[in-house]
Image (tube, rainbow, N blue to C red):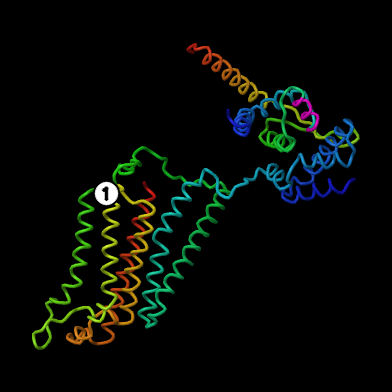
Amino acid sequence: MPSDEILRTHLQELRRGTVVVASLAALRRPDYGYALLQRLTGHGFPVDANTLYPLLRRLEDQGLLTSEWNTEESRPRKFYWTSEEGETVLHQLLDDLAAVQTSMTGLIQGVDR
Amino acid sequence: MSSLTDRYLAATLGAVPAARREEIATELRASIEDMIDGKEAAGVSVAVAEREVLTELGDPAALAARYANRRLQLIGPAYYLVWERLLKLLLSFVPATVGIVVGLVAAVDGDASDAIGKGIGTAIEVAVHVAFWTTLTFAVIERTNTPLNLPEWSVDRLREERARGERQVGLADCVAAVALLALVIAYLPLQHFHSWVTDADGGNLPILDPALWSFWLPFLIAVLVGEAVVEILRYRAGGWTWPLVAVNAVLGAAFAVPVVWLLLTDRLFNPDFVARFEWLSRPDNLDTVATVAVVATIAVTLWGVFDSTVKACRR
């Protein structure tokens, strides 16, 4: 029986890349940091706040997200949404994710590609 | 505004690039307040919620590093192996070489009693410097992402003799090493009775001081016998093992230290033998011979220790 520690590390490794895909997909609808965090958690993508907030900035720096400040509400919030470039990247990432799933299914069922 | 969040923001933003500080501050503050509100709505008191949220966000320095995309390692995997190889290479010979040269200069300057200590002290100092500056250079390279343009690893780099568990030492090597030691051991009594140097009356002149037979020469012979035993054990073990390396180093020191000490105190050579040669009997020349012999002894001993260590590492 593998220790919880080993299992946790492998799950972490497996989940790492999906945060980016999930964020790009979720931000087709504009949102601010905390609301996105809630939305991702609600959809089964638990992500640490200290990972997500810096990640949003990094994706923005890479041109995959666009942002705008909204100062109409009680506190100023930065809204992010997926840019055109982000949409292209998201498509490729989703394709790859599907390919991984297909390959895995094939592997398990013993079907050659 | 609660002071805990303020303090957290201050601690985080200090390490974030100044150009983006204000924007990150506003966004992070709003996010923290959102998170506190969320917990409050779930029935947690504000003070507890704040503590929980900040604990969740973790060490401000780590969060700032994520914002700044800064690495939390001194030398990462991209450069680690190059750093390690270079450091090992430099440490393998630079400190010893500099130490010997400094010790030699001290000995020639007439400060013979102090020469060994000075040499060893300098070697240690040089080793610390080499390690520090190499590491610093690589830490800077890591942070600036400098490409090193080193050749890619290829199978051609595999060394044949590195195959694990393979015998490093053949029977021929063992026999040769033991035979050499036997010759040296045999020479010690031989030179006492037959050195091919004669005094004015045609009698034999021993090269080494006969007074040393009371203790030092038997001691050195015992050490040499020990070294022969190490050679045989090494052959049986198939190469250098760490216990053998340790014993070999102790024996090396047990041989080199008395020899160097006897040389530096002018007690190794037979005074009559020295007096027989006019050139050798001049104090300056005798010192030169002693110095060369000291350096040779130290170099051979250090090489023996170094060589056995490297071979033990490779096993």
Residue for point 29% across, 69% down: B296
Residue closer to the observer: B83 or B68: B83
- Chain label for disc 1: B
Residue for point 22% across, 62% down: B181
Q: Is residue B102 above or below residue A13?
A: below
- Please indicate whether residue B172 sits to the left or right of residue B296 in the image: left
The residue singled out by tag 1 in the image is B169
- The image shows a total of numbered marks equal to 1
Q: Is residue A34 above or below residue B57?
A: above
What residue range appears in magenta?
A33-41
From the top left corner, tell me how far across and down residue B231 is, in percent.
27, 56
Residue for point 17% across, 86% down: B276
From the top left corner, tell me how far across and down residue B22 is, in percent.
79, 46
- Please indicate whether residue B210 sits to the left or right of residue B90 in the image: left
Quadrant assignment for the N terminus of chain B: top right
Q: Is residue A22 magenta?
A: no
Residue closer to the observer: B298 or A77: B298
Q: Is residue B226 above or below residue B160?
A: below
From the top left corner, tell me how far across and down residue B131 is, in percent.
50, 59
Majority SS type along the magenta span: helix
From the top left corner, tell me how far across and down residue A52 is, in percent.
72, 34
